[in-house]
Image: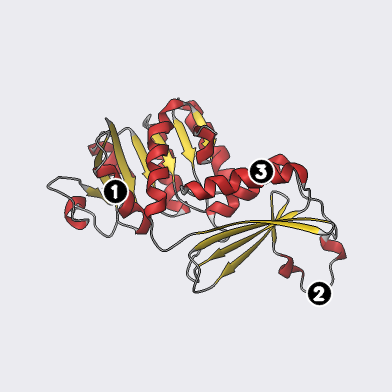
């Protein structure tokens, strides 16, 4: 029985995951983090069966009062980093579902995980279809040295790019850096319209009503083009299965792994 604590348990994705963990007979949901609902019972908030699942305001209090095996974090980058580091220092494992943590953040987190003999599984997006997009894009990047990423999201998403795209850019850069055909110094006009370079990969973020989360990786060669795209719907349900798998697998290694596929078999 894996004892699970969820930070951001009452949010869009966290609430669906909370229900999934609660109904999984191999897991026990033992606590939650939510500043808005501190002191309440998560079971009452989410209309779960009779249960006592305390909700805390901060991770330090939770760590002092609740015994759990795995923290899964669905908050924001600043809060998430605090939660992750505090949890690792207590010898517990962490699954990261929060967007916006940087490569430097993960370098620091990996060091702390190694020092405390714990594990962190950082997943930019838990949807299985996103895992496949990442794998297919990595395959294409081996053969096509020209590619850029377009990041689509709803108008009020504050992190740019999304965690999904940040992770994708990181992974593709490890395959190979795309060719730069025109350098920044050679550009004419509004240079910012070319987007931002993440790990040497050009990324463009669009924030408009009508989108949830979409990712488009475009590969180009002379007289041919390949587009690999993923679109999310409005439900958080697709993320639950992947998150549950992450919770199951995070204890099978030590240190840091990035991407759900790092613990999957293909």
The residue tagged with tag 3: helix, strand or loop? Answer: helix
Looking at the image, residue 63 sits to the left or right of residue 189; the answer is: left
N-term-proximal mark, 1 vs 2: 1
**Residue 38 place in picture, x, y as percent:** 23, 54
- Seen from the viewer's position, the closer of residues 260 and 96 is 260
Q: Are marks 1 and 2 in contact (CB under 8 Å)?
A: no
| Residue located farthest toward the right when viewing the structure as drawn | 186
**Residue position for label 2:** 189
Residue drawn 42% across and 38% down?
Answer: 246
Residue 103: image tag: none
N-term-proximal mark, 3 vs 1: 1
Name the quarter where the N terminus is drawn.
top left
**Residue position for label 3:** 138
**Of circles 2 and 3, which is in front?**
3
Colour basis: secondary structure
Q: Is residue 32 above or below residue 87?
A: below
**Residue position for label 1:** 18
| Residue located farthest toward the left when viewing the structure as drawn | 50
Q: CA distance from mark 2 to mark 3?
A: 32 Å
Q: Are marks 2 and 3 in contact (CB under 8 Å)?
A: no
Q: Identify the image quadrant of residue 247.
A: top left
**Residue 214 place in picture, x, y as percent:** 54, 61
Name the quarter where the C terminus is drawn.
top right
Q: Identify the image quadrant of residue 91.
A: top left
């Amino acid at each position: 029985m894996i004892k699970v604590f969820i930070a951001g348990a009452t949010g869009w994705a966290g609430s669906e995951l909370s229900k999934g963990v609660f109904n999984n007979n191999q897991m026990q949901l033992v606590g939650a983090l939510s500043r808005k609902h501190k002191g309440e019972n998560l079971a009452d908030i989410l209309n779960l069966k009779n249960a006592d699942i305390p909700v805390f305001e901060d991770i330090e209090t939770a760590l002092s009062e609740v015994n759990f095996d795995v923290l899964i974090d669905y908050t924001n980058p600043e809060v998430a980093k605090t939660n992750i580091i505090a949890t690792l220092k207590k010898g517990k494992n962490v699954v990261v579902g929060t967007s916006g943590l940087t490569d430097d953040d993960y370098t620091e987190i990996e060091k702390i995980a190694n020092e405390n003999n714990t594990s962190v599984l950082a997943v930019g997006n838990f949807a299985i279809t996103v895992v496949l997009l990442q794998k297919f894009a990595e395959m294409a990047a081996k053969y096509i040295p020209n590619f850029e990423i377009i990041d689509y999201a709803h108008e009020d998403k504050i992190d740019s790019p999304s965690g999904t795209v940040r992770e994708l850019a990181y992974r593709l850069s490890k395959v190979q850096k795309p060719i730069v055909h025109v350098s920044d110094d050679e550009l004419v006009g509004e240079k910012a319209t070319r987007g931002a370079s993440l790990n040497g990969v050009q990324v463009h973020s669009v924030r408009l009503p009508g989108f949830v989360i979409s990712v488009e990786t475009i590969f180009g060669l002379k007289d041919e083009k390949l587009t690999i795209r993923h679109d999310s719907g409005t439900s958080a349900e697709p993320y639950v299965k992947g998150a549950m798998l992450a919770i199951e697998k995070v204890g099978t290694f030590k240190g840091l792994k990035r991407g759900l596929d790092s613990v999957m078999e293909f």
